[in-house]
Amino acid sequence: MSTINFESELRRAGAHSTHGWRRLVFLAQRYLLGTIGLVIMVMFVWMAISADLIARYDPLSVDSAQRLAAPSAAHWMGTDSFGRDVWSRIIHGARISLAVGIGATALGSSIGVIVGLVSGYLSGWVDLLFQRVTDILQALPLLVLALVMTAALGPSLPNVIIAIAIPLIPTVARVIRANTLALREQPFVEAAKSIGMSETRIALRHVLPNTLAPLIVLATAQLGSTILTEASLSFLGLGIPEPYPSWGRMLSESAAEYVRTAPWLVIFPGVAISLAVFGTNLFGDALRDILDPRQRG
């Protein structure tokens, strides 16, 4: 284990300013792709928060007179087979995707941290038991396990979050466990034990904070996977139910029947999904490099 001195790293890279905002500018210029990813993420968050203000129509409003209208000044991204405005549905669909992505990532990461910390710190039969459970969960791909969980729980927003969060637990648990096994042998842990500090307090106050950097990187990377998984579940009819707008369900409703006659029904939801996943992946890669310079390529 080695301690990363961010001051020296910044000075070595050429950032001599002591002002925080100038450091942010320096990092933004140094990790340009990560900055682009962050801008994309901020854009989607802003869209989700301001959906009621920037959406031009009610995303659930049906207008048969405007059925399958091509993109125009009135409907920037056209309308679907029910006459609903595609732009408004994509804007409101960002709320669904971010709610599922952030909710599932937070829930899966929280449980994974608990499992990994307990497993790595206590070791012994507890570690053996937890590792066998995570092996079973990790044996199935994320989408397959999410499909099984969604089919068992039923299609709804809370159930989709739970169904996607459970497959994330093993990955987080293994990362936290690996870091915990290394940290529990460090001198500062022995020093805490020597002064009579309880095992629980040592794990929470000294070991857990030192595992947060890899956790942040992993959670950011998993956010894109959860958004893509939600879209896949909705595409298969097991995700967010109607009438709520979901990018995956928008593709499912139009991909087969209208891909030739109304391609905007496929292009715009597909671009939204791709941009969201692309942005989180770019930002996650840059965040990994910033928090652990040893992994820079």
Image: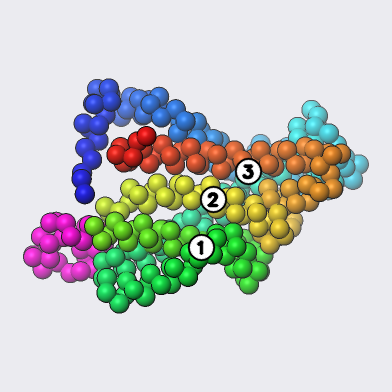
Q: Is residue 18 above or below residue 188?
A: above
Residue appearing at x 54%, y 64% in the figure? 140
Residue 273: give its label. 3
Looking at the image, residue 129 sits to the left or right of residue 47; the answer is left
Mark 2 secondary-structure assignment: helix
Mark 1 secondary-structure assignment: helix
Q: Is residue 169 visible?
A: yes
Q: Nearer the viewer, mark 1 or mark 3?
A: 1
Q: Is residue 205 visible?
A: no
Mark 3 secondary-structure assignment: helix
Looking at the image, residue 64 sits to the left or right of residue 170; the answer is right
Residue 227 on the magenta span = no
Q: Which residue is mark 1?
A: 167
Q: Give the CA separation, mark 1 to mark 2.
A: 11 Å
Residue appearing at x 51%, y 56% in the figure? 103
Outermost residue, bottom side: 125
The x and y percentages for residue 251 are 73, 48
Q: Give the CA separation, mark 1 to mark 3.
A: 21 Å
Residue appearing at x 61%, y 68% in the figure? 148
Tell me the amino acid under the disc marked 1.
Pro
> For the magenta stretch, what is the residue range?
183-207
The x and y percentages for residue 287 are 39, 39
Q: Which residue is mark 2?
A: 225
Q: Is residue 38 above or below residue 156?
A: above
The x and y percentages for residue 54 are 66, 36
